[in-house]
Image: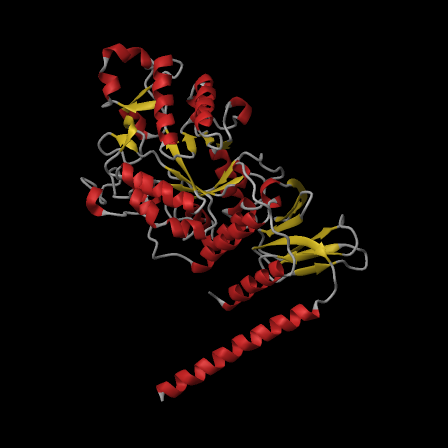
Amino acid sequence: MSFKKYIAGFAMSILLLAGVPEAAAASGIQNETIYRILVDRFNNGTPANDGDANVNDPNDFHGGDLKGVTNKLDLIESLGMTTIILSPIMKNAKRGYHGYWTEDFTKIDPHFGNKQDWKDLVEKAHKKNIKVILEFAPSYIAKSNAIAKDPKKSIWFKAETPKGREKWKDQTFALDLDNPEAAQMLKMAGGQWIEDGADGFLIHDASSVSQKFLKEFAREMKKKKPESYILADNTSGAGKTLKDLPGIDAVLDESVSRQFDQSFGKLSGHLPDKAFKENTILHIDGPEQERFGQIAGENGRNAATAWRLALAYMYTAPGVPMIFQGSELPMYGKKLSEVQQLVNFNSGDPDLKEDFERLGALRKQFKVLQTGKFELISNKDSMYVFKRWDEKDIIYVAINNDKRSHAAVIKDLEEGRQLKGLIGDNLVRADENSDYTLTLPRETAEIYVVSEDKGINWALIIFIIGVMVVFVGAIIILSRKQKRHAS
């Protein structure tokens, strides 16, 4: 950890000890922070189930499995994640590493492990208060699925062939989810996964799914587990809202990712003038998208810096933040074969990982960042300031996405207040006009919590100085010992 990072982290800890209120536990999708995983390209926990995996073929299995996810739960927890979404792990056709060539909706593909591996993952995740959501692709089955070969079930299928930019659709048949038998088969499969510990589903390509089916599926799953989440991957239906998708708790829309790419992927990008809806999944990277680090690099900016600013927004603005595997390193890639690589956990920027951890901790600490009201204060010259508040806390978030320093003025605070920075060591008090000026250097962000201005806290300052003196003294003594040993 760099000395600057140490001081910032130490200052934040002191501020929390000095009276910054702690959020009460809450429930609901807005309180989650999601880590999305493409299981086959995440982490190989055991070679025993690799089978015919071929890491040299970008269109084949590479060995990632459920044990690999279980082995990384400590890392996922340290990043502040409360939920993981797994790509479909159901039994797939040959080379169906992505999970969309389903041959059996109730069985685990052998490449990913077995039922015990699934139970181990769920049990250990739940002990860490991490929910496990499965991506579920109800609209398609593999052409090799036994259902496709049963003449009696020919009425289960749509007449047209699945179309889309994804090449994997060429190997599928489209299910007619208005057919009651087909719908019942899928609801039974979903119910089985819920009974086996799943905490909900991400419905793949939900905008192409029958709304009647979505509503019934969500109702059936929540009957079995009321706290389960039903999320919608709205890939081919950009612009659809929750009203259009009945029974859905939150929507993952590619248009959101594109806005983040445009805003933070380049220096001086303009941030959104309106807040996203509370039930919007805020995401950048994804399993079939160009990596954000790649976009930032091609625009001439440092990927880690771009990520820090994007995270400051994602973790504090209305919506549900979701990170794709490896973003904390960060990872790079333009082509699908580059984007969908096994994660190299031995690489990365340790300072960026600390940013993930710090912002994840703050989001957990302050309920207001999850469910508080939102007001845009300023959006000028790539200096973005907004306010989150509830009956307990007031927080201001400032993001300078420009190449120059900028300032913004807060005018609506009552007398006797101050703003404490939770990322750096910033402290802002009122000037002679009772205004509060937030000044940020280029490409930085700060989160300010409003508290009572009690003047200079000499007891706290003396305590901090004492701790630092002991710390510096220990370093000097250690350094002298090392010199004596060396001589």
Quarter in which the C terminus is drawn: bottom left
For the question of whether residue 337 can be seen, the reply is: no
Left or right of 297 on screen, residue 443: right
Farthest bottom residue in view: 487
Q: How is the image coloured?
A: secondary structure
Residue 186 in view: yes
Residue name at image x 55 percent, y 34 percent: 279
- Determine the image quadrant of residue 470: bottom right
Q: Residue at x 63, y 51 (%)?
A: 398
Give the image location of residue 468, x and y in percent.
Answer: 57, 74
228, 306: nearer the viewer: 228
Q: What is the residue that sits farthest to the right in this orientation? A: 433
Nearer to the camera, 407 or 146? 146
Which residue occupies 68% across, 70% down? 459
Residue 469 screen position, x and y as percent: 57, 77
Query: What residue appears at the point 62 percent right and 44 percent down from the top-left corner?
Result: 368
Q: Position of residue 405 (x, y in %)?
A: 63, 58
Using the image, determine if residue 224 lies above or below residue 299. above
- Exactly how many numbered labels are in the figure? 0
Q: Is residue 70 above or below residue 429?
A: above
**Percent x, y of residue 420:** 66, 58
Residue at the left extreme? 52
Looking at the image, residue 92 lies above or below residue 72: above
